[in-house]
Amino acid sequence: MDLVLNVADYYFFTPYVYPSTWPENEIIRQSISLLVVTNLGAYILYFFFATLSYYFIFDHSLKKHPLFLENQVYREIKYTVQALPWISIPTVLLFLAEVRGYSKLYDNIEDSAYGWLGVIFSMVSFLFFTDMGIYWIHRGLHHKLVYKFLHKPHHVWKITTPFASHAFHPMDGFLQSLPYHIYPFIFPLHKVVYLGLYIFVNVWTISIHDGDFRVPKCLEAVINGSAHHTDHHLYFDYNYGQYFTLWDRIGGSFKYPSAFEGKGPLNYLKTITEEKLNGHAGNGCKNEQFFSGESLKTK
């Protein structure tokens, strides 16, 4: 994060905001600057990528699904806008520790013990480490002692849009981001790579809420995509993973996506449309899986 802070200082904070007598490396100044940069960056990432996804990837026919809430997009955005500043407060404390040199982030490829090979390995290990961490944190947030206080607000959205991706209770959002921030305090990681991965994980979080269930056939059993995460929102106790299905398989919580079996939300909409055209509107609804699951009624 010091790369972003240095750019912000050079082009904005030092010439236009802070008095020249206030050193750039002073801890209070760094804290204020990081709070501004973190919030601004979070809003830009969220609105830019979620808006692109909503208009160019999200299937708007899903808004006709009975489980899609009234004014849902507005409510998702409002919840996110209110939550992000609170999520940023503990996040800034970790960024501050990075900026002040307590992490294992490094500047140059030469600083990696194994050169480019080490950089590539760190990218792969980051994904697997964070996937593992998020799985167990996410699964823990579903425990009955904490679920209704922290994670339940995110499960209001049964049929999600990209704007639901960051619509978390602030503590929920921070806890699920912890593995990203913890990694560079344990393992060496190039600063530019870390920044790129940080952007990637935010985009990925948007992508698994975008309603685009397409995954290359050879990766369906490996990648935790939107189809998997949609079933997590619909059926509650499955597919807690972030990128991969590995930990769901190990933890016994893997569910093969209903969308891949022809039983997903889009298939449901197609079915009821056909029933209406055939003059049997409503007959299938009573038996439809989306209304028969107890989890959809009570969670």
Image (cartoon, rainbow, N blue to C red):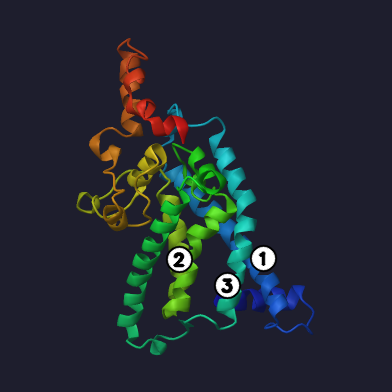
Residue topped by disc 1 = 36
Mark 3 in CB contact with mark 2 (< 8 angstroms)? no
Q: Viewed as shown, does residue 197 lie left or right of 73? A: left
Badge nearest the viewer, 2 or 1 = 2
Badge 3 or badge 2: first in the primary sequence: 3
Q: Nearer the viewer, mark 3 or mark 1?
A: 3
- Label 2 to label 1: alpha-carbon separation: 22 Å
Q: Which residue is mark 3?
A: 95
Closest to the observer, 248 or 38: 248
Which amino acid type corresponds to the residue marked 1 in the rendered image?
Val
Residue depicted at 56% across the width and 83% down the height: 101
Q: Which residue shows up at 73% across the image and 84% down it?
A: 23
Residue 144, image x, y percentages = 48, 45
Q: Amino acid at mark 3?
A: Phe
The percent coordinates of residue 73 (x first, y second) are: 54, 38
The answer to whether 7 is drawn above or below residue 232 in the figure is below
What's under tag 2, amino acid-wise? Answer: Pro
Q: Is residue 170 visible?
A: yes
**Label 3 to label 2: alpha-carbon separation:** 13 Å
Residue positioned most to the left: 218
Mark 3 and 1 residues: CB-CB less than 8 Å, in contact?
A: no
Relative to 223, residue 200 above or below: below
Q: Which element is circle 3 on?
A: helix
Give how far apart the Cα atoms at labels 3 and 1 are: 12 Å
Mark 3 vs mark 2: give the one in front.
2
Q: Read off the residue under disc 2.
A: 179
The label shown at residue 7 is none
